[in-house]
Amino acid sequence: MNKYIKFIALVLSLVMLTGIFFGCNKKAENCIGTVNGEKIPDGVFINNFFDILDKESTSENWSEDYNELYGNKLYEALVAKKMDGKTYFDTIVDKTVEESRIFMIKHLVFSTKAEWPDEEKRKELKENAISYIDQMNTYYGPSFGVKTVEEFVKVAYSMSYDQLVDYFVMSGCIETYKQKLEEGVMPTDEELLKYYEDNFSKFKTVQVRHSLLELPDKADDKAKAELRAEAQTLVDKYNAGEITFDNIMERSDDVDAEGKPNSDGYYVVYDGTDYVKAFEEWGLKQTAASDKIEIVETEYGYHIMMCTKILDTSDDEVHDRVYTAYMDEKVNSKVEEEIASYKKDKNYKIKDYNKEYAYELAKKVILGDAEAAASADATATASGATADANATPTPTVSDAAADTTVVAKYKGTPIYKAYYTQFFSQAMNNCFAEYDFTELNKIESEKEYFEALKKVFYEEYKDGKNYLDYSKDEALDLMLNFFAAKEMAIAAEKGYSKEKTDKLLGELDTQIDSLLSYSGEQYGVKTRDELLKKIMNMNVNDYKTVYVDQMMVNDYATSIIEEIKPEESVLFSHYQKDPDKYRIVTIRIITKSILGADKKEVSEKEQNDVLNFLKILEEKIKNGDSAEALAIGYSDDTDSANGLMDLTKAKSALVGEKIADWAFKQTEVGATTIIKTDSAYKLVVIEGLTDYNGTKGITTSSDITHKVVQDQVQTEYKNYAYEDQVEKYVKDNSLALSDIDQTVIQQVIEEYINYNSVEDKEDKKETE
């Protein structure tokens, strides 16, 4: 993947079926244009621009030099190159505009069909989109150094929160419609076999076995020659019958953490497996299984390779690939048939095309908001732009060597400081999961915010410990269980191959480079290490090892969790242990402010008047008046839901501890109370109660049912069951960390709490 590809390219493809909308951003002052009277949403254009960039990066027009460029440097290169009288940047934008037009045609045409998702399904898609974005923010937000989900979306996806949700829903509707078309395609075995044979080069699948003799970094010609000679010696001995391939595997450098060959050297190769080019090409040239071996040279060293099997459609994996490709081709063919006439219809050409705005969005994707705004060339015919003197500096890859400071040992193996840094951060996040940050989030200054946060760290959490002390111990437990899980994964042959590891690290490099290019100036940093130190408290090479291990353990955990199938009685028993943890209480809040124009509390008399007024409304509700109507008529907080919200324990901080505590004690719909906060009196009404067995009253959406509660219980139960397996493994094998260095632990804690903000740096500059 090329280094300009931003975070969006890695995640949008994962959610095409999870979420999406059917409109456009009506509030946007600018618009790229319209298709049959419907505006093209910015989110559609931005996503298509990412897709076109990704496709272009694999075309013959894409210079290898571009792969090392990003930000302003990449933009300059794209506008400097000419193609058919236009700059390469012009060409990419034009392709994006056309793809956006086709997208809108599909949406407009399919939305008139009976198979189009109904209103309830569209609501479900929107809820899924919102949930997905929240999850991505929870997981990646800290890495981007943002406080809100809106900020996360802006940085990670180059668009606003509403635009992203709208795009997800639009795409989801189209994909759902295509799924309906797929139901009408029922290929026979004969049709699939013919499709396989007609497209054999695409589906040809070969199983190979290899042993890698890895070249050391920066190996000179002499080292290469010596390693090549060693590989040839092994081949000669094999051909002479002196050794077996198993003996050759004993020499392999493609091994897991325990030194065992990954997958015993076996790999399946087909077009698109994305292995090293020479490795993949050799595999695809094979026509039959053989005991002959050859040496294949790659940038990693010398692979001694053997073809062990040619797979066909009798293999489940090959059959699934053929089936999926066949279905995609048939469905896409149907789609093209349905939109063919519309693509030629003049009413479905782009009207009111705002070329300047399209270029503005495209440049923002590459440059980021600040650079795009400052770019000297804002015209629609971008050509030959020069570098902006104030642009974010192009990142230089001069990553420091990994810190080998040992914090502890696992079965005698050193654990480096970076791991404890990661797990201490995770422990702190776990502790603060239900903390009410309402007051802290009112602080505008970054510096003041973190000073206030530091004070919170020393507040009592539980077991007589403050947040820092509790997290210090919890991090050690998390770290022990993590390395036990890693050991379990390797034992289950779920370890990563060298190729898989290298691919992950390449993608990580792309993310780091993109974030530096996009937000380096915002963070006040110029290098990759400075950036990672800012947001992860470690350097790039420290994080790389942690990252790969985490991805591997996550994959292993997912595979185990999917296999857990609890019975209904077991799930209900789990629910009954703490029903409030899962229950959904739907409340409506009618708010009346007690603050004056100066943002200070009004007089005691005026506050009593507000309280008495809410008591009148409360009496009306008890006498049968509509709480919704009263909220519409009298609440100071106006929103589309008229004060209605589905409250869970996890979201209790949104309404404050007083309201949440009262709400979860209620057992009847219609219960009311009046609660005073720092800024208002709030009349709270219980509108709905949803538990494991059903719903009483109403909820904000038809999607909020007892099934949501049951799904949450099942998810948590399965997660706990997996954790229990790990803890049992730890206990059964009497595992424990050894040689724990408290000095290093204290160093990690100090680095965590002494946040060095951009604002701090600016303060220092002013005083110098």
Image (spheres, grey):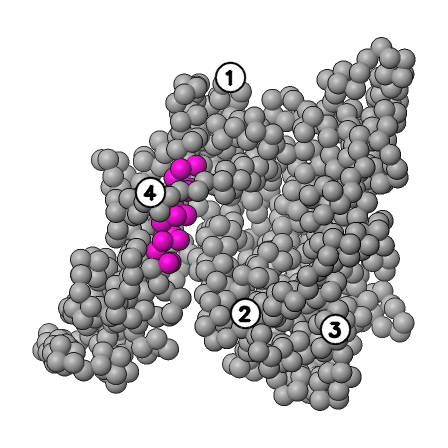
Quickly name the residue at label 4.
570
The mark that comes first in sequence, 4 or 2, is 2
Quickly name the residue at label 1.
412
- Majority secondary structure in the magenta region: helix
* C-alpha span from label 4 to label 2: 36 Å
Name the mark nearer the viewer: 1 or 2. Answer: 2
Quickly name the residue at label 3.
336
Residue type (three-letter) at the residue carrying disc 3: Glu
The mark that comes first in sequence, 1 or 4, is 1
Q: Give SS at disc 4.
A: helix
* C-alpha span from label 4 to label 3: 49 Å
Image position, residue 10 (x, y; %)? 63, 54
Which range is magenta? Answer: 707-722
* C-alpha span from label 1 to label 3: 61 Å
Name the mark nearer the viewer: 1 or 4. Answer: 4
Q: Give SS at disc 3.
A: helix
- 754 vs 159, left or right, is left
Quickly name the residue at label 2.
169
Residue type (three-letter) at the residue carrying disc 2: Val
